[in-house]
Image (tube, rainbow, N blue to C red):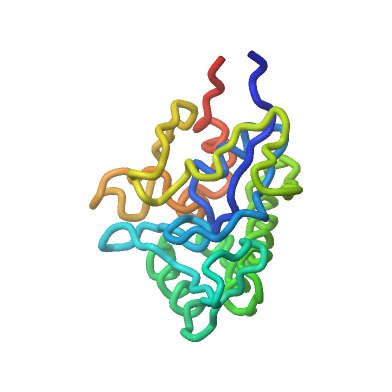
Amino acid sequence: MIPPTGILLSTAYFAPVRYFASLAAFSEGYIEQHEHFIKQTYRNRAVILGANGPVSLIVPVEKGREQKIRIKDLRISYDEEWQRNHWRTIFSAYNSSPFFEYYADDLEPFFQKKHEFLFDFNQQIMDTLMEILELQTPINLTAGFEEIPEGSLNLREKISPKAHRSAPDNHFIPQPYTQVFGEKFGFTADLSILDLLFNEGPSAHSILMDSWQQID
């Protein structure tokens, strides 16, 4: 059996380490843009580590009459000041981390400018993170739902913040690294890429590469 060379993923808001480790391991990445929005997933949430444990940062979305809406057409809601709240929470969690000040100027604008669509917002975040992480994997958008690109591994539904939804993955082997609240909680695996970036800086790239094992 020929091993896959591409990876198919859902869109994600400051995706977890496993997400970027999979992108780093494959020669091509595909992001699903035609699926219907699914609640309680990384599509509109990120999980970071705060002083009291893991914290979910959720991007609110507009609720239209149609229950089923394509992810690329889903609008962000600004009924509440979630951007300011997210940045305050991130600052509180990571301002003492070794590389927070180094990357803050690149990332803070995402919490200042208003973006209309969740998918476009996530893609801009991904583009910035791929550049920061020095990941060269080309990113493509899907041509249609359920059209899994040939030679690609489908992880659209398998990377989830809900333990019962997240599929076991023998490929992903989390590599421990120093975390701000590590002495209090021990190592917490597979948090948002923000956690790895602020704590490890340029070393994040090699940690991602070491976190994915190809299985014959």
The x, y position of residue 130, in whole percent, is 67, 50
**In the drawing, does residue 8 fall left or right of residue 17?**
right
Q: Nearer the viewer, residue 1 or 86?
A: 1
* Residue found 57% across the figure and 33% down from its top: 209
Q: Nearer the viewer, residue 71 or 67?
A: 67
Residue 134 vs 115, above or below: the answer is above
Image quarter hosting the C terminus: top right
* Residue found 44% across the figure and 26% down from its top: 170
**In the drawing, does residue 171 fall left or right of residue 116?**
left
* Residue found 23% across the figure and 52% down from its top: 184
**In the drawing, does residue 25 fall left or right of residue 163?**
right
Q: Nearer the viewer, residue 209 or 77?
A: 77
The x, y position of residue 132, in whole percent, is 65, 52
- Quarter of the view holding residue 7: top right
* Residue found 68% across the figure and 33% down from its top: 6
Q: Return the residue found at the far bottom.
A: 79
The x, y position of residue 78, in whole percent, is 54, 83
Q: Return the residue found at the far front.
A: 66
